[in-house]
Image: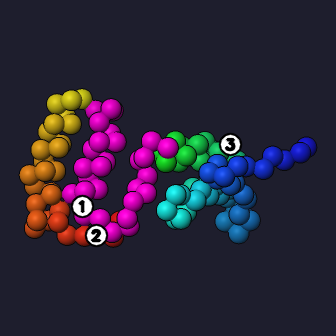
Amino acid sequence: MATRRRGNGEGTIRYVEAKKLYEARLTLDNGTRKSVYGHTYKEVRRKLAAVVRDRDVGALMLGDARQTVGKYLMSWLHITKATIEASTFISYEGHVRRHISSPRLGGCASQI
């Protein structure tokens, strides 16, 4: 059976003998790696597809590793806007803007 090489941005899947698990690894645009594990090849392939889908829609943080909590939550809100009700989005956005993005809390840079 011939094996097919994966293209750039598709990730890689391998069996880790020491852990007795399959590992899928994907290198993101900023150079960091995202790994997922599973007991079967099929399970890991499904998880890798989800990671690739999240990367493509921008759900994975690809920006600066140091950013404020407020900026992170605002970007998360705009990513999830399509999956929540409009009134919920307005409520969440108000909470983030008023309470979390304040200079005392959300203005502090944190490692995520």
- Residue 15 x, y percent position in the rendering: 73, 59
Label ID, residue 42: 3
Please state if 2 lies on the left or on the right of 33 as rendered.
Answer: right
Q: Quadrant of the C terminus?
A: bottom left
Look at mark 2 in the image and give the residue it sits on: 110
Look at mark 1 in the image and give the residue it sits on: 69
Q: Distance between the residues labelled 3 and 1?
A: 36 Å
Q: Do the residues labelled 2 and 1 touch (CB within 8 Å)?
A: yes
Viewer-nearest of discs 3 and 1: 1
Magenta segment boundaries in residue numbering: 56-84
Bin the neighbour count of mark 1 within 10 Å (Cα to Cα): few under 14, some 14-19, many 20 and up: some
In primary-sequence order, the first of circles 3 and 1 is 3
Does the magenta segment cover residue 75? yes
Q: How far apart are marks 3 and 2 (CA)?
A: 36 Å
Instruction: Say which of 44 and 32 sits in front.
Output: 32
- Residue 57 x, y percent position in the rendering: 45, 42
